[in-house]
Image (spheres, grey):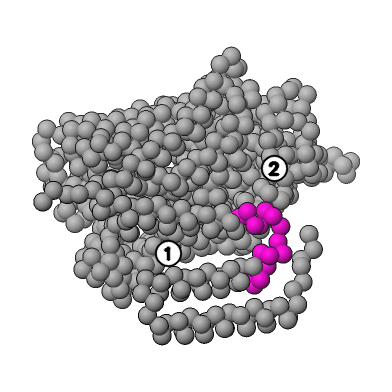
Amino acid sequence: MESEVQNKAPRTHYINARYGLKSWLFTIDHKRIALLYLASITFFFFLGGLFAVLIRLELLTPKGDLVQAETYNRFFTMHGVVMVFFFLIPAIPATLGNFLIPLMIGARDLAFPRLNLLSWYIYVVGAVFTLIAIVGGGVDTGWTFYTPYSTTYSNGNVLLTGIGIFITGFSSILTGLNFIVTIHTMRAPGLSWFRLPLFVWSHYATSLIMVLGTPVIAITILLLAFERIAHVGIFDPKLGGDPVLFQHLFWFYSHPAVYIMVLPAMGVISELVANMTRKNIFGYKFVALASIAIAIFGFLVWGHHMFVSTQSVYAGMIFSILSYAVAIPSAVKTFNWTATLYKGSISYNTPMLYAFGFIGFFIIGGMTGLFLAALGLDIHVHDTYFVVAHFHYIMVGGTIMGYLGGLHYWWPKISGRMYPEGWARFAALVIFVGFNLTFFPQFLLGYQGMPRRYYAYPDEFQVLNVMSSAGASILGVGYLIPMVYLFWSMRYGPKAGSNPWGAFGLEWRTSSPPPTENFKVTPVVTWEAYEFSPVEETEVIDISTP
Amino acid sequence: MAAHIVGKKTYFGIFGALMVLTAVTVWVANFDLGRWNAVAALTIAVVKGTLVVLYFMHVRYSSRLTWVFVSSGLIWLIVLIALTLGDYMTRGWVKIAQ
């Protein structure tokens, strides 16, 4: 009788293990910290989206009639700052990475759980500084903070925003450090490097960039502040400095930062493609090592942002060649994903739709990146909407598609509930259409010569701009729909089993949602990566699962 | 892995070396070495930095993996400086017609 009562009692998992605000704010459980990040970045995603709405509203008409030029400068700057530093960079690593890496390697938590919580607090403190800067009038330098405008002439809240980014950078460094140590030291017995899920490989590569690159942007911001406050000549030519030095230092971090955004998304796509086709990834080792190659090559290409500065043409040639080289590991991944589809048992459910979207957008974004890596062509399209379209195809079309695909795929694990598949497919389709309508016309606008960061434009550009603004409104609706049904599903969605997708990976061998300690028994891995076999799939390690 | 215990003698020795090198930096500043000014200052700074990393940060007694990560930080710094200087040092190569 007593055991029957025990069986009927709700199973304890990481969400219901403790209650109350304090239990969340002082948690050291990586899964709860991932949800703290999820809430924070969602707020910033919609804040950054609000600035995007204002930008697209202004650009509906050729004349600058909605806001003044100075206000428009603040809109696109705050859009960039918020989206890049407070959404895109932490988007996948801090949420899905935090939640999944320990589960995927059979560990109970990250190597430094308290440091993990500290990372979130540091992120919040940095975010508060930036929010104060926004409320206090914003900043107008563009997210790139180019000197000497930012150090000498801008009357915006440059320092406050800079401090916010400086502080948030430490959150990124600590998360990267935590991931590296965890992946090196806490893998389950038998889980060798080439048995790791590709999601873990891509996060390892991302962490290397976070740890090695982020300190440079921190130093650059400090130098900028030093010049702005103390008027020491570092970047301002009037004071004996060199503005191009700022660009070198800024892009040394900020180009690899694109890979901080897109490498984790590539890890998500690898998981989706393998599990939704029920095949091992074609050329697993090449895809794994391509992540490391992208992380390394990514640090050698920053000068392609500076072809029209006073950078030496010889340095330009080297940076151009190296930029072409980074296309090789990127292409390895894309070819191998598509080769995996061949003769696969493909499920066309929502996560896979996002994976298809990612592959298409990444190809367009990547190929147009080669246009921009070409010295001659870049001079024509530099600082035009062509560049804006290109990086949105990578950062929005790539990262956000990967993020949403991953969020849907692991939602049953995170929440223990299924989302409504019909609505989810509809939203994926709306996002796909809205995204293309928003950004494809911008390629044409840029190629025809419309510069970026202007609040007014000649009449002949209006049709394409209206298309872009219309697309943005569709895209906005597309992003709101998942927000609504995911919240709904947390209470009303059908309960998910341990492994609703029949997927491969240790995270699917514990219950949904997982217990606080992840696994009741430390798993011993005796299988290769993505070794699909019906017998292994039914074995669930969490013995407490009813 | 058991942590390596470093004796007080070593720490005081390194501290002494750092103080001596600081005094050397000040002393060298009294002489105008021309283009070697920066070389002298940077050499002393690198030696001091290496002592701190090896002894105060315990890298000398750490695993090979730690050595790999410490080295990679150094290599990244070299990449940053080398490619940036690659720009500055080749700017004058193109002769602009007057």
Which residue sits furthest top? Answer: A343
Q: Nearer the viewer, residue A485 or A188?
A: A188
Q: Which residue is mark 1?
A: A219
Q: Quadrant of the N terminus of chain A?
A: top right
Cα separation between marks 2 and 1:
34 Å
| Residue A524 in the image, given as x and y percentages of width and height | 80, 39
Q: Are marks 2 and 1 on the same chain?
A: yes
Seen at 78% across and 24% down, the residue is: A535
Residue A492, quarter of picture = top right
Residue numbers of the magenta segment: B55-69
Residue B49 appears in the rendering: yes
Q: Are marks 2 and 1 in contact (CB under 8 Å)?
A: no
Q: Is residue A494 above or below residue A204?
A: above
Residue at the image position 64 percent from the left and 61 percent from the top: A114
Residue position for label 2: A105
**Does A219 appear in magenta?**
no
What chain does badge 2 belong to? A
Q: Main secondary structure of the magenta part?
A: helix
Picture layout, residue A123 above or below residue A406: below
Does the magenta-highlighted stretch encompass residue B62? yes
Question: Which callout, 2 or 1, points to the residue nearer the camera?
Answer: 1
**In the displayed structure image, the side of residue A240 where residue A164 appears, left or right:** right
